[in-house]
Amino acid sequence: MHHMKRSDLNLLYALDAFSRTGSVKAAAEMLNLSAPAMSHMLARLREATGDPLLVRAGRKLVPTPHALAMIEEASEVVARAQAVLAPAVHDERWSLANREFAVVAPDELTIAYGVRLLSAIRAKMPNATLTLLPATSTNFDRLRLGTIDVEVRAAGKLPPEMKVEVLRKQRTVVVMHHSHELARQKMTLTRYIKAKHVCQSTSDELDQLVERALADARVSRRSVLRVATPYAALAAASRSDLIATAPDALVQSVAKDLGLVSMAFPLKVEPLLVGQVWHPRADMDPQHNWLRTCIREVLGTDKVGDLSAASSRDSI
């Protein structure tokens, strides 16, 4: 019977250390090994993989394509191994760390919930700080590289390795200042089309759903002002006779301050499913787990049971 040869997982630590430091000497120091021992481990890695792994480029050693692919895998395995072997979560020291969390979220959620999210996090992690960043790109490089912890976004098509949890249904409402003549009338499609609108210059998913609903009804709105974010649209509506179409979460949190009233959008628009997305390497980290718990508690509204049914139905 053929016995499975057991691989030495320390080789992955060696590869990870080398990729982080870029030199045999520095990697050896990082792992508390002698330089010859580190060289020996790299030699064993070459033997195990049948790949040179590192090739000379001038005076430096650079990883081969196979090594680059392994390095990403290795750093994940090492992170998971460290998480598995970390002290059990009832060791609460993690909660006192000076952790800096970075979360990408749409402007409206930042404005509506940013401060609440920070205080939820600090209730258990008093030394944590939070950076809220705008959604700038559609790619997932920042999550892969670990420069951000979580991205809150439309829970649509995601790369297969990413983890996602649906938080809420984002709905659309029509908003105007309480002194607007339409504030005392029922919002019909005709009145909506006749009004002057403040719209978004950069279309997001919710805006695209609104545009699609209008196009399907073969009508269009007259946009006289375009602004970059939903909050800027609400601010404009609060100081003019323009009407805005915005996400309900934002409207609920700022309408009173801005003297706005909101009404149902006159056409049927599918609600947008919004979720939190993270990279699996952070899955076992108790701090990251706490961040996701806080995001779920502060941003999650609908019962997620209903949502998973809705999202699976949509994807069929």
Image (cartoon, rainbow, N blue to C red):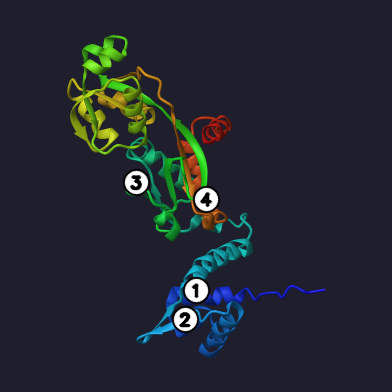
Residue type at tag 2: Leu
The residue identified by callout 4 is 160
Point out residue 32 in the picture as x, y percentages from the top left corner: 54, 82
The residue identified by callout 2 is 54
Q: In this view, does 204 lie to the left or right of 224?
A: right
Q: In this view, does 239 lie to the left or right of 59?
A: left
Q: How far apart are marks 1 and 2 (CA)?
A: 7 Å
The answer to the question of whether label 1 and label 4 lie on touching residues, with beta carbons closer than 8 A, is no
The answer to the question of whether label 1 and label 2 lie on touching residues, with beta carbons closer than 8 A, is yes
Q: Is residue 37 left or right of residue 60?
A: right
Point out residue 111 in the picture as x, y percentages from the top left corner: 33, 37
Quadrant into which the C terminus falls: top right
- Picture residue at 43% right of the left edge, 28% below the top: 271
Res 45 → quadrant: bottom right
Relative to the observer, which residue lies in front, 204 or 77? 204
- Name the secondary structure under disc 2: strand
**Labels 3 and 2: the sequence-earlier one:** 2
Residue type at tag 1: Ala
The residue identified by callout 1 is 67
* Farthest residue, direction top: 185
Mark 4 crowd level (few <14, some 14–19, many ≥20, 10 Å Cα): few
Q: How far apart are marks 1 and 4 (CA)?
A: 22 Å
The answer to the question of whether label 1 and label 3 lie on touching residues, with beta carbons closer than 8 A, is no
Relative to the observer, which residue lies in front, 146 or 73? 73
- Picture residue at 26% right of the left edge, 20% below the top: 176
Q: Distance between the residues labelled 4 and 2?
A: 30 Å
**Labels 1 and 3: the sequence-earlier one:** 1
Res 210 → quadrant: top left
Q: Can residue 135 be seen in this view?
A: yes
Residue type at tag 4: Pro
**Labels 4 and 2: the sequence-earlier one:** 2
The residue identified by callout 3 is 135
